[in-house]
Image (spheres, rainbow, N blue to C red):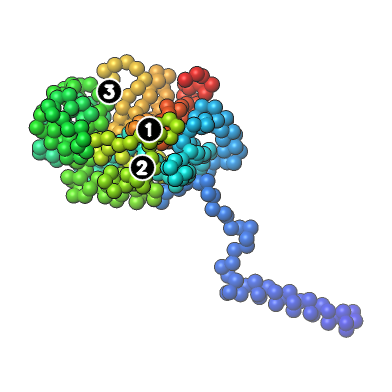
Amino acid sequence: MSKHTIAVAIFVIFLSFSCQKKEESPLLAHYVPEKEIKPIDSSLITLPFSMELHPVSEEYKLEKSKIIGEYYNTKIGLSDFSGALLVTKNGKIIFEDYQGYANYATKTPVSKTTALHLASVSKVMTATLVLRLVQENKIDLNEKVQTYLPDFPYQNTTVKTLLNHRSGLPHYSRFSESVKKWNARKTLTNADVLDYLKRYKFALLAKNDTKFNYCNTNYVILALVIEKVTGKTYAEAMQEQIFTPLGMKDTFVFDFINQKNEVSQSYKSNYVNHGWDQFDALYGDKNIYSTPRDLVKFDLATYSSEFLRKDLWEEALKGYSYEKKGIKNYGLGIRLREWETGQTLHYHNGWWHGNTSSYTTLKNDTIAIIALSNKYTRKTYQAMKLAALFGDYPFELNEKE
């Protein structure tokens, strides 16, 4: 071997040793090659609670989203639709679309951060807040309402019969039929509703816990119970117990006095403004504004015992009214469809002025189907039928309405 060859070999060995030392340098110890950095999945909605939910493949997403898109274009998202549809599995967005105007006068479009009026879907959150307070031993489901609100005039009504609409309370929208000189211009508060019940002691529609009767008054009173036991306003308690823990940053309880011009507006057909009435300041039964993505965060929380104990979720999700045969039932703040073949579907719909809403949660399939609109349409409720894509639910996507 020549001296030149030996010199080259020594140089190569030195260079190799030098490079190896560089790679082991403390300055590079925490470097992660670019190919190992996993990008954030912008189509995945998550929560800081433990949940056993499996990843959803892109193949699954593409397969389902194509069918949902076709259904949406023919059944829901027609040219006159103003609102949103969001479908997720395990927090993974399968389909998402927004269209129309949050404010037609300013041509402000509906987007993923546009909070829309949930109408009666708000009841789902009111009920969950009550259950959180049960978990904290501040409320007992079987306790009489009078324990919390001494002025409440019906002695047999319990917290549970308010939640499952078995109290028999009269509808506040019909108080005017029994009150002389009813002031239709007065904007009612929750306290006013309780005061009317106390002063007039309206006849119950049925004895407590004998019959289902869906009634907004139940949830107006529940909001007062929440305020009494927490010492906070309903809006403050909801923010503290639900919105903040779940990161629902675009969700809020409507302040009728100060936010009428700020919130997404409510429309009849052709974007004719619906206007307000004397029941618009009442809360608990309605008046939560939210986005589909925030509602998915709420839905994900229903799979976590860290957020609410398993036994309380089970109390909420079972049916309570079996006086009549049929598939429809009601839990604690959630509607059910229970088919004789064994399937159970949980959901809640809403309607207030021009706002319609539909929240469907498939517990066996970890699917959330959310449709919201601020321009009156019943097309929103067609979203529930998408359940047929994910489980054995007796819906036909091609059937006529």
Task: Answer few, some or many: residues within 10 Å of disc 1's Cα (few below 14, many 20 plus, some between 14 and 19).
Answer: many
Whole-angstrom CA distance, mark 2 to mark 1, is 14 Å
Residue drawn at (16%, 30%) of the image: 182
| Type of amino acid at the residue the image marks with label 1 | Gly
Whole-angstrom CA distance, mark 3 to mark 1, is 30 Å
Mark 2 or mark 3, which is nearer to you? Answer: 2
Answer with left or right where residue 160 lies relative to residue 361: left
Q: Nearer the viewer, residue 121 or 162?
A: 121
| Type of amino acid at the residue the image marks with label 3 | Ser
Tag shown at residue 321: 3
Answer with left or right where residue 69 lies relative to residue 395: right
Residue drawn at (45%, 28%) of the image: 379
Residue farthest along the bottom direction in this orientation: 3
**In the image, residue 234 above or below residue 268:** below
Mark 3 or mark 1, which is nearer to you? Answer: 1
Tag shown at residue 354: 1
| Type of amino acid at the residue the image marks with label 2 | Tyr
Image spot of residue 110 (x, y percent): 46, 42
Q: Nearer the viewer, residue 238 or 269?
A: 269
Per the image, label 2 sits on a secondary structure element best described as strand
Residue labelled with disc 2: 289
Could you tell me if residue 301 is visible in this image? no
Residue farthest along the right direction in this orientation: 2
Q: Quadrant of residue 345?
A: top left
Image spot of residue 184 (x, y percent): 20, 32
Residue drawn at (36%, 47%) of the image: 262
